[in-house]
Amino acid sequence: MAHFTRRDVLRLGSLGVGALGLSACRQGPAATIEPLTQPPDFTVAFLTDSHVDGELGSAEGFRKAVRHALDVQQPPEFLLMGGDQPMDILATGIDEADAQFRLWDAAVEDVAQDIHVCLGNHDILGISDESPLTADHPKYGKNYFLQHFGLERAYYSFDHEGWHFVVLDSLAIEGSGYKGWIDEEQIAWLDDDLSASDKPTVIATHIPIFSNFIEYMRGTAEGIPGGVAVVNSHEVAPVIEKHDVRLVLAGHLHINESFLYKGTEYANVGAVSGNWWRGERNGFQEGYTRLSFRGDALTKEYIDYGWEPPPEALEETPA
Ligand SMILES: [Fe+2]
């Protein structure tokens, strides 16, 4: 069972090897994401990994990112939140979870647009051995997230102006850990959902379906830890490739990488929190991703919203 902790992520980052954006067409048609030549019909902002807990200016930083995304000439028609909304509730009790989510809620309370939210690993309550909670608590595990956002389950879909959007639940809980996983029931649902749509589609997931991040950091000889990417990606990708999925957006890694496979771009994008509010992450600034749609064309752009960490954030040794 993979147990990929925040400390592991920071350790990977501390190797000091800069991860570069990657674009490689291995098979299939040319890139489906082309620059728009006309103004978009609509835009969407994807903000992921805000990790708000009030420390290191995180609440202020998240609010700044939201305002930066909204205060533009053509504001996004909805916000997609890519997961890890709070800093971490894996290891906390209810009071700390509530405190972190209160700060997150406050930053978006005046947002008029719809907000669609992905489940992140750090949105899962109390499964760590360090948490005082036990599994019989009514908000244990994914329940806190589901109840907080009024969801029956953490995967769902919706349409917007000729496009189809899918939010996946990319996490399995096993004991006191988690792994990237799309279960059998959800894969069947995804196939049915995409079959019922005739629209070009964007999928959002917290844990990437695929990633080259470990290869950037460690070379190619080691396996990919189960917390980094979806372990059963080989069962998910065949469903995706059967349908008109243009883009699969993911968070979790706090870096930007993307590649194209059979006409679908898999893009893992940078975090609102950068290196968990301690500056840039492997050379990637704190930021969010703007999607622009016109007809059946789509572009994406990673936007640095100008956050500068307070001096103490850069002086602290990561936990
Ligand atoms: Fe994260």
Image (cartoon, rainbow, N blue to C red):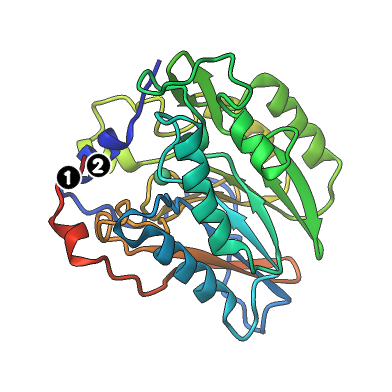
User: On the picture, is 190 further left or further right than 27?
Assistant: right
Closer-to-camera residue (67/178): 67
Q: Is residue 234 visible?
A: yes
Residue 79 versus residue 83 in the image, above or below: below
**Amino acid at dot 2:** Leu
Under circle 2, the secondary element is helix
Q: Is residue 165 above or below residue 79?
A: above
- From this viewpoint, is residue 84 visible? no
**Contact, CB < 8 Å: mark 2 with mark 1?**
yes
Decide: is 15 above or below 301. above
Percent of width and height locating residue 82: 54, 49
- At 19% from the left and 44% from the top, the residue drawn is 318
Residue at the front extreme?
A: 95
* Residue 40 lies in quadrant: bottom right
Badge count? 2
Q: Where does the image place residue 177, in percent across and percent down from the top left?
A: 42, 20
Q: For this view, does 207 lie left or right of residue 57?
A: right
What amino acid is labelled 1 in the image? Ser
Tell me the residue that label 2 is attached to.
10
Image quarter of residue 142? top right
Classify mark 1: helix, strand or loop. loop
Using a 10 Å C-alpha cutoff, classify the residue at mark 1 as few (fewer than 14 neighbours), some (14 to 19) or many (20 or more): few
The quarter of the rendering in which ligand 1 is drawn is: top left
- Kindly identify which residue carries mark 1: 14
Q: Position of residue 120 (x, y in %)?
A: 51, 39
Image point 29% across, 39% down: which residue? 9
Measure the C-alpha gap from mark 2 to mark 1.
6 Å
Q: Quadrant of the N terminus?
A: top left
Q: Give the label on residue 89, or none.
A: none
Density class for disc 2 (Cα within 10 Å; few <14, some 14-19, many ≥20) is some
